[in-house]
Image (spheres, helix red, strand yellow):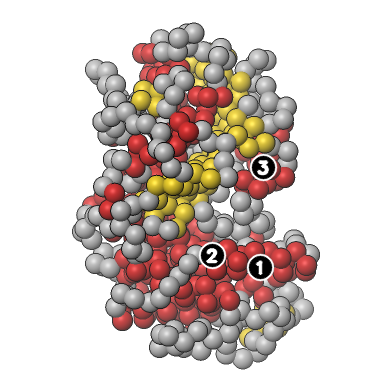
Amino acid sequence: MMKGGSGVLHQHGPLDHSITQQSNEQWDCASLGFSGIGSAPNTSEIRANNPERNELSQWVEQVTRQLIEDLPENETGVGLQANSTGTSTYQENIVPSLLGELRPKKIARRNSECIGHHHHHQWSSHDDHLARDDNNRNRNEMIAKGLNGLDDQGLNLITLLLECAVALSVDNLGEAHRMLLELTQMASPYGTSCAERVVAYFAKAMASRVINSWLGICSPLINYKSVHRAFQVFNNISPFIKFAHFTSNQAILEAFHRRDRVHIIDVDIMQGLQWPALFHILATRMEGPPHVAMTAMGTSMEILIETGKQLSNFAKRLGMSFEFHPIGGKTGEIDISMFKITRGEAIAIHWVQHSLYDATGPDWKTMRLLQELSPRVVTLVEQEIALGGCFLDRFVGSLHYYSTVFDSLGAFLQSDDSSRHSVEHGLLYGEINNILAIGGPARNGEDKFRHWRSELSKNGFMQVPMSTNSMAQAQLILNMFPPAHGYTLVRGDGTLRLGWKDTSLFTASAWTSPNSR
C-alpha cells in the first residue's frame, strides 16, 4: 500500500492542512497528520524554545573544523608523494594516534586525499585553492564552542573514526582495516548514544570502501522497495520529507496559476508521495482542473509503473484529466526527445535530492537538459552536504551532517524504537555508504556540483523567491512536532531552510527559465 498526503491546497494561499479522506482509497492520507490551518508567521526565522546545541553534533563541528584547518597549505607537503602513475604513496607514517590528542589539543597536521589525489580534479591550481578556502570558511561559520557533554567512550569512538578516515584518504588500507576492526567491536547501531550509532554506520561504510578498494568494485546494490519503505517511515517521524514535498507543491501551484495544460517532470519520483495533495487542489480550482501530464523518472521501471497506476487512479477519482509517462533512466543520460511535451504546456521540474544513489547521472548533462526543457518552474530541495570533492572532504561534511540528523531522531525516539532503527539502517546508512564507499571523482570519474542553486544561477535560471505562503506551509508542518525538539526554520535569500538547532539540513528553492513555456 502506498502512503501519501492529500492535504487541501488553497488556490491563492497556502496549503490547507485539513485532511480529506475518501472511502476505499489506497492512499493513506492520515500519514501527514495535519490538523489545522496555519497562517504566515510574522518572522523570517523560527527557532525552537530550547536553544541548547546537541552535544554530539557540536563536538563533531569542533573536531572536523580543526581537522580541515590543520591540513597543510602545500599540496606537495611531507607525507605523500605522487608516483609516475599518479597514485599516492607513503613517505612515512603520517597517521599518529589521535586518542587523547583531541582533548583539548588541536589535531596534528596531516595530508589527505585532497592533497595526494589532486590530479582527479578538473580545477586549475588557483581554483583549487579558492575552493578549499571556501570550504574552510563555510565550516568555520558552524559556531562550534567546546567539547561539553560527550562521555569518554563517545570521544574515543569518534577520534578513532577520524584517524581511520585519514588513513583511508591516503590509501593506507592496512592501517584503516586495523582501526575498523576495533571500531566494529566498540560501536553498535543499537547503542544508546547517538555517537555510538553514528560511528557504527560510518565504520560499516568505510569497511565497504576498504573492500571495494581491494576488489575494485564500486557499484551499489540497492533494494529500492526497502528504501521506499524507509522513506515512508521517515516521512511519519520527521518533518524533513514533508517540508520538501509541501513547500515544493506550493511553488508549483503558484507557477501553474490559470494554466490549463501543465506538465510535471519528477527527476526521481520513487512512490510519488507528494502528488495527491497537489492533484486535489488542481482538481478543485475555481477555473476548473487543468490537464495534467507527468513524466516520472527512476531506476526501477516496476516501481514507476506501479506509481503511475496509483496516481492515475487517484486522478480519476478526482475527475482530473491525467496522463503518466515513465522513463527508466537518469536525466543526465537521456535527451529531450524522450519527453512527450505538448505545445502550450507549463512545465514544472521537481527534484528532492538525496544521497542514496546518483539519481541524475552527469550533472552538466542534466543542466543542459533543464535548459532545453525551458521550465516555468524548477523546485529544488537540496541536502546541505557536499557530494563532490575528495574522500576526506566528503567524510568531514557527512560526519557533521548525519550526526545532526541522528541527533534529531534521538531527541524524541528511544534507542530501541523500531521506526528510528528503520530510518537509520534503511535510509541514512545507505546515504552514508554511498557517499563514502561508492561516490567521489576518484571512483566514478566525475565531480558533482557542490550546490545546484549556484549552478542554476550561473546557467541563466532566475530565482523565484519562496513565498510567504510557502513559509506558512513549512511552519505548519513544524507545528506537528513539539517545539522542544529543536527544529529551525529560516527564510532568507529567497530560500527556505530547515535544520536541527543551528545546523541547516535541507534548503528549498524555486527557479524559472528565461525561456519558460
Q: Judge left or right: residue 237 versus residue 246.
A: left
Which dot marks residue 9?
A: none
User: Circles 1 and 3: CB distance less than 8 Å?
Assistant: no
Q: Nearer the viewer, mark 1 or mark 2?
A: 2
Q: Quadrant of the N terminus?
A: top left
Residue at 64% across, 86% down: 79
Q: Is residue 346 visible?
A: yes
* Residue 109 percent coordinates (x, y): 58, 84
Residue at 42% across, 80% down: 160
For label 2, the residue is 141
The residue most toward the front is 42
* Amino acid residing under circle 1: Arg
For label 1, the residue is 132
Q: Between 323 and 142, which is closer to the camera in this rendering?
A: 142
* Residue 61 percent coordinates (x, y): 46, 69
Graded by Cα atoms within 10 Å as few (under 14), some (14 to 19) or many (20 or more), the crowding at tag 2 reads few
Alpha carbons under labels 1 and 3: distance apart = 22 Å
For label 3, the residue is 456
The residue most toward the bottom is 92
- The secondary element bearing badge 1 is classed as helix
Alpha carbons under labels 3 and 2: distance apart = 24 Å
Residue at 62% across, 73% down: 113
Q: Nearer the viewer, mark 3 or mark 2?
A: 2
Residue 348 location, quadrant: top right
* Amino acid residing under circle 3: Leu
Q: Earlier in the sequence, mark 1 or mark 2?
A: 1
- The secondary element bearing badge 2 is classed as loop
* Amino acid residing under circle 2: Glu
* Residue 73 percent coordinates (x, y): 68, 79
Q: Between 409 and 438, which is closer to the camera in this rendering?
A: 409
Q: Earlier in the sequence, mark 1 or mark 3?
A: 1
